[in-house]
């Protein structure tokens, strides 16, 4: 029970701090939890609001809590584990052979009843189900038969206008006519890569890298060149520059806004330097920007497109991570490769679904999408703190943990004895899915790494799942 002892000589604000510490030790409060508001805590303890504020400010100064505008005060994770190591040093161009492992992983993570810690599905941490359903009903009542028809190859004009309008908020102007609507972000990546490269070409990408990029490179018979990537600041521009001096790189394919799986975010200055480096050599940059709206530590990075002077940046994005993965609506800003990209879109899928495009147009125009993001992003930050604290509690002490600035995943470096593929198999047997580290590399460099997703409503089942995983890791590490 919360109580203040006025007979003690200790300052009242110090007693408030002690009470919060006691609740943390008891597990009543955990990393990511929101503290009572100043007024509510004041009423509970029968002390003044300035006294509570003084206690909260002192806790914030110590790094124990964080004040978030219009949201309140939140418990910060007390990091004890080390940060994951920097991604592998830049290597030689490599043939990719990861599809068999990816097939196994996807078969496992989609099994019914499995705890889906292997799926990066951030929007489901705070689903927009009701507002999207209402938007679709409004569209169908107005559009009637048209909503069931084919869309134009390059996309519904209304949706393209809404996307272009959003780019104004990110600091740049985009012509709606330059946008191509795609079937999710993956088709945008596939079109972009085929528009700029051919079989046997060398494609530079981050290490670790998004598995979807590696699978595309493998399916198209290209070679992957993995570039050293910092778990905090993103891809190393210096390492990339050295690689370009040594290798004939045809294109770069990067998740530089928010890296998957590291959660690192490159600064605008770094991204501008990246574009300048590549355009000085006439090398296209394919930018995967699907997590750009989900940065919760610092400002949303500008799309690299805005730093381009030659039209060599192709930006790929999607509503799959932010609103509705099942809608499969993404888009591509192909720069100077518009004509080739448009032809590829028509050849691959003719067009994307019109009803879902019209629904998202309505959803964006109503303001519901922005309201959804304002709810979703703090939830993801809270979940990241909770999962970090749970990993620190249940996994071995020498486990390395990423410190994501956005997105919905943690990247864990496990003790060297742990084989993440074997851990994946054991986890599936316990009804838990994870992503083993070697699906994020062309060269099997992350055997003892895994990715965990916190893109779900936090629950006791997730907490228990992490405890089970921690036990499995400890068994393998012994």
Image (cartoon, helix red, strand yellow):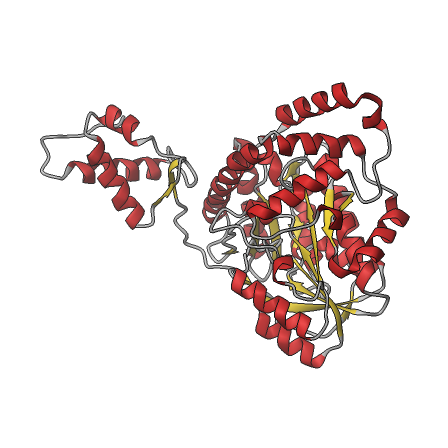
Pick whichever, 312 or 71, lies toward us. 312
Examine the rendering and report whether any part of residue 129 can be seen: yes
Residue at coordinates 52% horizontally, 32% vertically from top-left?
460
Residue at coordinates 83% horizontally, 56% vertically from top-left?
339
**Image location (x, y in percent) of residue 68:** 40, 41
**Image location (x, y in percent) of residue 98:** 77, 58
Q: Is residue 238 above or below residue 31?
A: below
Q: Residue furthest top?
A: 141
Examine the rendering and report whether any part of residue 408 can be seen: no
**Image location (x, y in percent) of residue 234:** 56, 62
Instruction: Tell me the quadrant of the picture where the C terminus can be found.
Output: bottom right
Q: Is residue 178 above or below residue 47?
A: below
Instruction: Tell me the quadrant of the picture where the N terminus can be found.
Output: top left
Residue 283 horizontal side relative to residue 145, left or right? left
Q: Quadrant of residue 148?
A: top right
Q: Quadrant of residue 262?
A: bottom right
Q: Residue furthest right?
A: 347
**Image location (x, y in percent) of residue 310:** 70, 66
């Amino acid at each position: 029970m919360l109580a203040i002892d006025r007979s003690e000589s200790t300052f009242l604000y110090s007693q408030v701090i002690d009470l919060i510490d006691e609740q943390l030790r008891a597990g009543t409060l955990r990393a990511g939890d929101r503290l009572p508001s100043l007024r509510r805590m004041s009423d509970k303890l029968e002390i003044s609001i300035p006294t509570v504020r003084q206690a909260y400010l002192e806790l914030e100064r110590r790094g124990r809590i964080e004040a978030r505008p219009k949201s309140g005060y939140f418990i910060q994770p007390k990091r004890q584990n080390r940060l994951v190591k920097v991604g592998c040093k830049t290597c030689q161009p490599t043939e990719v052979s990861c599809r068999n492992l990816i097939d196994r992983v996807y078969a496992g993570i989609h099994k019914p009843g499995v705890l889906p810690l292997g799926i990066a599905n951030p929007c489901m941490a705070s689903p927009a189900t009701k507002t999207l359903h209402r938007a679709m009903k409004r569209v169908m009542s107005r559009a009637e038969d048209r909503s069931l028809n084919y869309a134009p190859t390059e996309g519904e004009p209304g949706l393209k206008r809404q996307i272009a309008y959003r780019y104004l908020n990110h600091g740049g102007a985009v012509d709606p006519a330059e946008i191509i609507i795609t079937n999710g972000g993956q088709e945008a990546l596939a079109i972009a890569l085929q528009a700029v490269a051919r079989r046997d070409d060398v494609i530079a990408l981050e290490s670790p890298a998004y598995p979807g990029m590696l699978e595309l490179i493998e399916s198209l018979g290209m070679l992957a060149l993995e570039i050293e990537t910092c778990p905090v600041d993103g891809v190393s521009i210096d390492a990339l520059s050295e690689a370009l001096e040594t290798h004939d790189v045809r294109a770069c394919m990067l998740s530089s806004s928010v890296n998957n799986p590291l959660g690192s975010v490159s600064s605008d200055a770094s991204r501008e330097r990246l574009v300048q480096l590549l355009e000085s050599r006439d090398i296209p940059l394919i930018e995967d920007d699907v997590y750009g709206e989900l940065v919760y530590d610092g400002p949303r990075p500008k799309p690299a497109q805005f730093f381009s002077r030659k039209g060599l940046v192709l930006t790929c994005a999607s509503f799959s991570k932010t609103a509705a993965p099942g809608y499969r609506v993404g888009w591509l800003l192909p720069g100077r490769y518009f004509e080739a990209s448009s032809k590829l879109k028509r050849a691959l899928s003719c067009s994307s679904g019109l009803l879902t495009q019209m629904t998202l147009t309505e959803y964006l125009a109503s303001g519901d999408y922005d309201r959804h993001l304002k709810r979703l992003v703090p939830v993801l930050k809270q979940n990241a703190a909770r999962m970090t604290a749970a990993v620190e509690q249940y996994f071995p002490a020498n486990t390395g943990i990423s410190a994501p600035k956005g997105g919905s995943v943690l990247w864990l470096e496990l003790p060297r004895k742990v084989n993440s593929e074997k851990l994946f198999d054991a986890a599936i047997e316990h009804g838990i899915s994870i992503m083993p580290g070697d699906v994020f590399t062309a060269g099997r460099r992350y055997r003892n790494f895994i990715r965990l997703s916190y893109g779900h409503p936090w629950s006791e089942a997730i907490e228990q799942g992490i405890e089970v995983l921690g036990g499995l890791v400890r068994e393998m590490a012994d």
